[in-house]
Amino acid sequence: MALLELQSVSKNFGGLRAVDEVSFQVEPGEIFGLIGPNGSGKTTIFNLINHFYPVSGGRVIFNGQDITGLKTHQICQRGIGRTFQVVKPLKRMSVIDNIIASAFLRHRSMGAARRAAEESMEFCALTHYAKQLARSLPIASRKRLEIARALATQPKLLLLDETAAGLNPSELDEAIELIKQIRESGITVIIVEHIMKVIMTISDRIHAINHGQTIAEGSPGEVARDPKVIEAYLGEETHAQSRGN
Amino acid sequence: MRGRIVALIALALLIVFPLEVKDAYYRHLMILVLMWMTIGTGWNVLAGYTGQVSFGAAAFFGVGAYTAGIISFKLGISAWWGMVLGGVACAIIAVPFGMITFPLRGAYFALGSLALGEIFRHIAIIWESLTEGMVGILIMQTFVSKLPYYYIALALAAASVLCVELVARSRLGYYFVSIREDQDAAASIGINTTRFKMISMTIHAVMTGLAGALYMNYMGFIDPEVVFSLHDISIMAILVGIVGGVGTIFGPLVGAFIMVAVQEVFRTAGFGTMKALSQFLGWNFLETLTKYIGMAHVLAFGVLVVVVIMVLPNGLVGDWKKLRRLFIRG
């Protein structure tokens, strides 16, 4: 049974159909990539899964249960964690306090929450920054903080929104390694990513969208060869030329 | 650790104070300071820790005071029961009010809370059969001496501070601060933001209500313009909070001292020095001017807010290090 299933999910912003009947299934234990050009609706899909926006149509099924109408915090309690493309650290709290705040979801006592937070902090290699204020962190560490905070809620499914954007090449490799480790720890991952190196290396399957509509789904190799995907990324004319040659 | 020592020394000084100072006037001022410590501490939970700036302290202060007054005046029950029932009444009001206003964010919540205070002021004026309207409520005070009131006010202030100290170090405190820093991030880590804002609001409401009930017992007289006053209660609560420093345990305590002193300087025109000066110099206009300045104390409060926000955005306690550097260098 799929861990997460989107059934013809749609979202209208006024007259704009940002997401148009998108359906996909994410199997337990996989890394599922979501790609598409700028403004194609990837982040909107994340915002629909964890109910930052209500859906305009369709259903979201998680772990066999319909979670379409649940509130954001309830969805997190069910086991879906997320990070934000534009990072949202709790700025005037230290790194460890950021993570403790989210560890309190599963642990009632301060001691237990702190231990869980330390574990998650170490996993994301942030121990060095523990006592620094979150706002003083460099961008790569802020992205790690997002992940550490999401992991501390003990998710079954983790939504990573452009975790690799803005990282330098060595940070990029570390990010890829981290995402692989997260999967190995038994957490299913959906990633939205612009950097092809990242998404092509680590995804088991990729779902491509453009203008809010599904254009392809399959293994990274299949999706990369799909004419519709090439067209969406490179534009029709270029594609026509390359076919002509 | 150092904070705890400072707190214990401060508590010891406050316990000894009325035994050493017999002057009723200074005892009275200190009772007001302790009352404002309680209100400021409650306001700080909602605004300082949770980030929801309340302009509605007067609503809860007035409801607490009127609960104490009405049970005594109408039902003949001791007004001290208001210290329990006033808190309960405020909690009951806080829940529906929170449900209406917490979908609002930032300035809109502040405006909603401001409206709440004004609504209750008008209810108290209009519903004469319950509240005696503008005539106000007069009750017999229990004690002649100020000493018992002082220690009750001290106990209330100490209990409030202890309560906030415990909350700040717990899951609740972490959730409050998370909501202040980023509501969306807070929701995404599983925090029910509406519920925890509600809890924070209830703490604010109950502490302010208890202070109101104490005020009724202590002063023996209330009317709507006094206890539901926008500037003398709601704005004052904000000033106590920000002058001392929002989001710190000691901020409202320092703020209470300063603001009661500032208020008193305006009320008495510099403890009568201006009057003495005008008589000494024979300049009558000085006395007239002083009268106008006294009436314009709300304006002065406004100027004070601007100065504090510009110079010490984190308040005296929050910017203590900055202040100390300034003095050592100077």
Image (cartoon, rainbow, N blue to C red):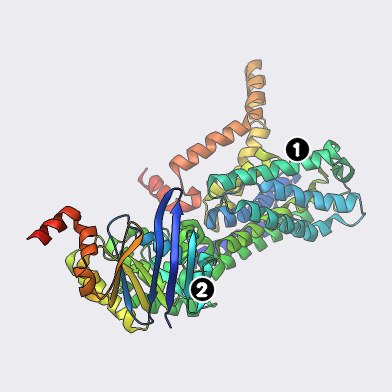
Q: Which chain hosts label 2? A: A
Name the one closer to the observer, B169 or A245.
Answer: A245
- Tell whether A244 sits left or right of B327: left
Q: Which chain hosts label 1? A: B
User: For the view shown, which residue lies furthest in the left direction?
Assistant: A245
Q: Residue at x 14, y 55 (%)?
A: A238
Residue B56 x %, y %? 65, 47
- Tell whether B74 sits left or right of A154: right
User: For the view shown, which residue lies furthest in the front direction?
Assistant: A244
Q: Is residue A93 above or below residue A150?
A: above
The Cα atoms of the two marked residues, 2 and 1, are separated by 47 Å
**For the residues tagged 2 and 1, is the chain the same?**
no
Q: Is residue B297 above or below residue A245?
A: above
**For the residue labelled by badge 2, is the local secondary structure a helix, a strand or a loop?**
helix
Residue B219 x %, y %? 80, 46
Q: Amino acid at mark 1?
A: Glu
Q: Residue at x 47, y 68 (%)?
A: B189
Q: Residue at x 46, y 66 (%)?
A: A50
**Which residue position is annotated with label 2?**
A77
Give the quadrant of residue B197. Answer: bottom right
Name the one closer to the observer, B167 or B33.
Answer: B167
Q: Is residue B274 above or below residue A19?
A: above
**Does residue B31 appear anywhere in the picture?**
yes
**Does residue A97 appear anywhere in the picture?**
no
Position of the C terminus of chain A, as image quadrant, is bottom left
Name the one closer to the observer, A188 or A180.
Answer: A188
Residue B319 x %, y %? 44, 50
- Tell whether A80 sits left or right of A224: right
- Tell whether A72 sits left or right of B19: left
Q: Say the numbered circle drawn on residue B225.
A: 1
Q: Amino acid at mark 2?
A: Gln
